[in-house]
Image (cartoon, rainbow, N blue to C red):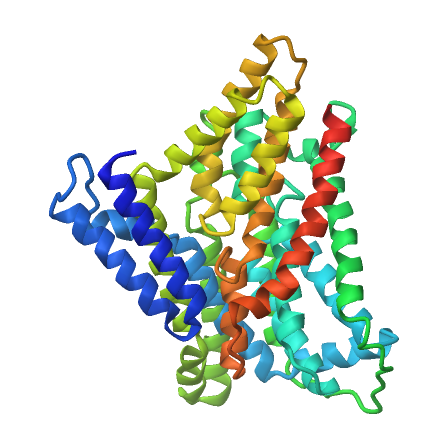
Amino acid sequence: MNTLNVVSLIIFAATYILMLSFQKIRPYVAIASAFIFVVLGSVSVFDGFSYTVCDALREIDWNVIMMIAGTMGTVFLFIESKMPQLMSDMLISKMPNIKWAVVALSLFAGIISAFVDNVATVLMVAPVAVAFCKKVNISPVPSIICIAVSSNLQGAATLVGDTTSILLGKAANLDFADFFVDTGRVGMFFVVEAGALASALIILWMFRKDDKEINIEDRTEVKDKVPTVLLVATVLTLIAVSFIPYKSNAAEGQFYKPDVTNGLICISYFIIGLIREVIKTKKLDIVKAAFKEIDYYTISLLAGLFIVIGGVTRAGVIELIGEAIAKIGGNSGGSVFLVYTIILWMSVLLSAFIDNIPYTATMLPVVAVIAASLSAAGNIVDPKLLYYGLLCGATLGGNLTPIGASANIAGIGILRREGYEVKARTFMKYGVPFTLAAVVTGYILIWVIWM
């Protein structure tokens, strides 16, 4: 480990400690840390480390930023139409009590998230949860947290559920169907769903005291259904394009989609909604109100974090982590179970603080080498055992902290706009048991199926 690695780790650790400790200034901390990395990379303080402003801007996931902005705009129109209130009324009429309603919302978000980006899912489902919580006079904080972590969980269910799944599909040569049945064995979809059921039991237990019956006499009247149509169209379009590969995952000569496709879709439907409202009302007030509702706090935080993670990655820190895990695996005496355990649980821990996309991209070739080494040592091991263990740990680890995943950040941003500041310990009160239930379930099932 050289000086650059040490300095990068110190900056990275200080960034996350400050963000976890002072939630109100998280965007400023992230942006300040990003600025430090850019300055260090621009003035060539360390040999071999270059990180210019242009490099930093390229590290920002503009697809996610555009999705947040576009979806928030459409969701604003959706809320103004009073459809979330009507949907919450319908939910109340179908559920026996509050705890089952929260479970239903969490599972609903998870199902959507298996095919739609996690952030977009949270932004779409959260308004219904907020409206529901207002109806029954409870804090929306636990419900939104459960929706966010449930969305993160289901990202590993299908090939198109999350970027980590796409990366694994390319490395292990998997197609969409392999996530359901892989070489005659149960695929990751059913492993994830088993984890979802286990986590649902955790939610039921955590909300066990909220067994008050809920009733509603009058349903909210919705006169304008077009914003709902736009939101549904957004979901369906995102699902449709999810089957088109990005350039990095497309075969030679295969048609591929631009990196910002999802963002453009969300922005487009938002603009369509705005144009319709202006034509209908002949006023620009709705445009001002819609742009005012976009959560620039969350967008700034995510942009800063993307740049920080990019700096840490360029500094070689993530590669060092991969090498360290490989060494631990190599020193494990050839125990397949121990190596599998290390890869999965180390991924859970690290993904709580490191973006799981660069981490997964770094670890996939490392896992392939470890699997080959174990086989050469006389151990019969299917590489997919370690691949799926990596996917399980890297995808779910972000649920441990409020800033471990973009969906968590988006959910907390919604709560902040509702007047609720979520502290790290409050988030972890729900995120940790949820994550442990889902990960332990996946940990056991993956081992049983693939060993």
Q: Nearer the viewer, residue 125 or 14?
A: 14
Give percent across and percent down for residue 418. Answer: 54, 82
Q: 211 above or below 110?
A: below
On the picture, is 451 further left or further right than 424?
right
Report if residue 303 is visible in the image: yes
On the picture, is 336 further left or further right than 414?
right
**Residue plotted at (78% across, 24% down):** 184
Q: For the N terminus, which image quadrant? A: top left
**Residue plotted at (62% across, 41% down):** 392
Task: Count how many numbered circles sit on residues in the image.
Answer: 0
**Residue plotted at (64% across, 51% down):** 153
Report if residue 180 is visible in the image: no
Give percent across and percent down for residue 229. Answer: 63, 69
Give percent across and percent down for residue 233. Answer: 60, 62
On the picture, is 399 further left or further right than 109?
left
**Residue plotted at (42% across, 89% down):** 283
Give percent across and percent down for residue 136. Answer: 75, 85
Q: 100 above or below 55?
A: below
